Image (cartoon, grey):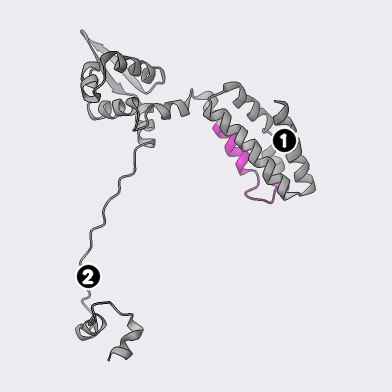
Amino acid sequence: MGNLIQHRDIYKQALQSKDDNVLLREKAWLTTAAASALLEQDTEAMRRVRACCADLSALADRFDTTGKPGDRWRALGDVLTLALESGKPLEQLRLVLPNTVGGLMMKHIKDQPGITPTELSQRCDKQLNHISNEIKKLENAGLIHCFKRGKNKEIFLSILGKEALDSVAPLKIVAQQESKRDYRYIDGKREQRLTASGTPRLPFAEAAVA
């Protein structure tokens, strides 16, 4: 906490003296401290950073000319508050990454709502005890719901699970189909001259071809 306060105070002094180099350096240090706390899911560290930087947005609005005034600190406060109040959003996202067992399981649960642990074990080619452990993690994170139907357990995505899965879904690359050119009003002879050499020529080169 001592380092946080020290760097915050240096940042404030740089605001007053309009020392942009120091300003940018301290802004980066404080942002890195916040990012580290978020990535490590360190609740106490997140609280310390949020408290330390709580009054910086108003000061930055008045004195910081190195970028969007206080937007960085407002956004930082919002992210830290979200992380502290909503559980562990970064942990939830980590659990559903496509290259993890949890992510693969989530995909199968989405494709087949009500799937059983045994079916997941077969689909993912993993031992049932491994799947059971992953189910506990996903359920504790609020990403899935498990319902007992007789001897079987049926698994469904929660709303949070659907949102988390959508947020890490890989982008679909759609191949562009070459559309037929429709030049209904073009002069056929002019088009023939432009492409006579096999390489399309620029319109202003027509005089040289003619």
Give neighbour class at mark 1: few <14, some 14-19, many 20+ (Cα, 10 Å): many
Whether 126 is drawn above or below 169: the answer is above
- Quadrant, the C terminus: bottom left
Please report contact status of discs 2 and 1: CB closer than 8 Å, yes or no: no
Q: Is residue 193 left or right of residue 43?
A: left
> Residue at 28% across / 89% down in the picture?
209
Provide the residue span drawn in magenta: 61-79
What percent of the width, then of the height, locates residue 201? 30, 80
Q: Secondary structure at mark 1?
A: helix
Find the distance from the CA under tag 2 to the CA under tag 1: 61 Å
Per the image, the residue denoted by label 2 is: 181
Whether 131 is drawn above or below 182: the answer is above
Query: Closer to the camera, 125 or 88?
Result: 125
Number of numbered markers: 2
> Residue at 20% across / 21% down in the picture?
122
The disc placed on residue 182 is: none
Q: Is residue 172 left or right of residue 73?
A: left
Q: Is residue 132 left or right of residue 83?
A: left
The disc placed on residue 8 is: 1
Query: Closer to the camera, 90 or 196?
Result: 196
> Residue at 33% across / 80% down in the picture?
202
* Residue 115 seen in this snapshot: no
Mark 2 or mark 1: name the one nearer the start of the chain.
1
Query: Closer to the camera, 56 or 46?
Result: 46
Q: Is residue 161 magenta?
A: no
Whether 166 is drawn above or below 185: the answer is above
Kind of residue indicated by mark 1: Arg
What percent of the width, then of the height, locates residue 144? 34, 21
What percent of the width, then of the height, locates residue 142? 39, 21
Kind of residue indicated by mark 2: Arg
- Quadrant, the N terminus: top right
